[in-house]
Amino acid sequence: MKNDIHHIGLQVIEKDLQPFYIEILGCIPLRTFNLSKEEAFSIFNIKKDVEVIYCKCNDIELELFVVNNIKIPTFNHICFHTDNATELINKAKMAGFRLHIREKKDKTKTYFVCDSNYNLFEIKTIKQ
């Protein structure tokens, strides 16, 4: 059996859509739909109508559930490799998003950037 990740669903705050997901991560919105509170309750046990934006960030597909409630921070995170980590991190820093750089003894760097709703992204540079 072969398993692949199709998409990742995240709860996001509306104010982060443009600056974080589109401008920093480079997501391209593909479609938007509304999930009724009845269906949201059946699937997620959350009784609330929600707007969902399905987008693609290069080869990563995200399903963004726009709910303007702040989540409690967790250890959940998404890690991806990119060939433009420095540019991505500079954009995040300029936009004021939380950022941490972890440098290893071999001088390689791993970047952590977080949106306003504590969705954490671990960014690694693709080794050439």
Image (cartoon, rainbow, N blue to C red):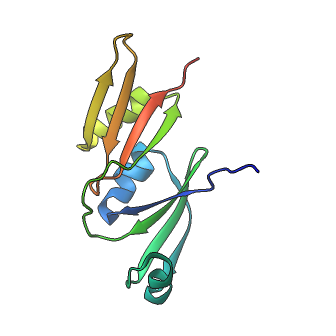
The residue positioned 38% from the left and 27% from the top of the image is 110
Residue at image position (46%, 81%) is 40
Does residue 92 appear to the left or right of 45 in the view shown?
A: left
Where's residue 78, x and y in %?
A: 45, 45
Q: Is residue 73 above or below residue 97?
A: below
Residue found 54% across the figure and 25% down from its top:
126
In the displayed image of the protein, which residue is found farthest to the bottom? 38
Residue located farthest toward the right when viewing the structure as drawn: 1
Quarter of the picture holding the C terminus: top right
Q: Nearer the viewer, residue 98 or 23?
A: 98
Q: What percent of the width, then of the height, locates residue 63?
A: 51, 62
Quarter of the rendering containing residue 18? bottom left
Residue lying farthest to the front in this orientation? 1
Residue, x 38% and y 80% (percent of image)? 46
Residue 92 in the image: x percent, y percent?
32, 40
102 over 2 or under it: above or below: above
* Residue 127 location, quadrant: top right
- Left or right: 44 in relation to 128: left
Measured as percent of width and height from the top left, residue 86 is found at 39, 27
In the depicted structure, whether residue 124 falls above or below residue 48? above
Asked if residue 37 lies left or right of residue 103, the reply is: right
Number of dots carrying numbers:
0
Q: Is residue 31 above or below residue 78?
A: below
